[in-house]
Amino acid sequence: MAVVFLIIGFIVIIKASDILVDAASSLATRMGVPKMLIALTIVAFGTSAPEMAISFRSVALKNAEMAFANIVGSSIVNVFFIIGIASFIKPIKVKHITIKKELPILFLVTTCFAILMFDSMFNPLTPNTFSRSDGLILILVFMIFVLYLVNMVMRKKEIEKKKKLNILYI
């Protein structure tokens, strides 16, 4: 019976994520939000919603280790397994600018996460925990990243707008 509930849970999670992504994308498009920004934020939230729900539930049930393992495991699966399968099926072209900008961001975020996790590295008498201040730092880093994405997309939109105006005047 547990297997049946697991399968039903997977189906519900997948369908709910699809509905969330479709609705948010539709709303954002109607509001004039660029498609790149939709892909980098709304779709990312939609696909991460199941992990977020599991993590919140785990923390509420005082099983924080499950939340931690869920996030780390999900990151590993996303970076290695999903990109590996996708590139095995069809090679993925990565622009130089992506390597130049997003890869260092991934490295910095991973490093920040590791430093916040290893409290005992700085003080051997301290247990490795994520404190409220660590949580605030992670949320601030996330907000900075979202602002970076918004700024990048708006700058790209402005450049495209200028190119269209130049073509009209030529």
Image (spheres, rainbow, N blue to C red):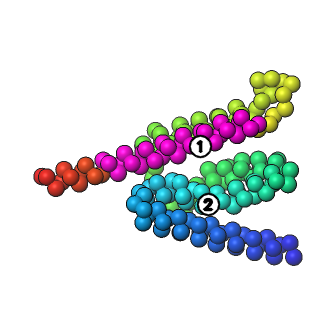
Element type where label 2 sits in the image: helix
Q: Which residues are magenta?
A: 131-159
For disc 2, the marked residue is 47
Magenta residue check for 140: yes
For disc 1, the marked residue is 142
Pointer 2 with pointer 1, Cβ within 8 A: no
Element type where label 1 sits in the image: helix
Q: Amino acid at mark 2?
A: Thr
Residue 85 seen in this snapshot: no
x and y, in percent, of residue 47 in the image: 61, 60
Residue in the picture at 82% in, 47% down: 65
Seen from the viewer's position, the closer of residues 100 and 49 is 49
Which tag is nearer the camera, tag 2 or tag 1?
Answer: 1
x and y, in percent, of residue 156 in the image: 36, 48
Which numbered disc, 2 or 1, marks the residue that appears first in the sequence? 2
Prevailing secondary structure of the magenta residues: helix
Q: Amino acid at mark 1?
A: Phe
x and y, in percent, of residue 16 in the image: 64, 70
Residue in the picture at 59% in, 67% down: 20
Side (left or right) of 155 relative to 10 = left
Please, which residue is most extreme toward the left here?
170
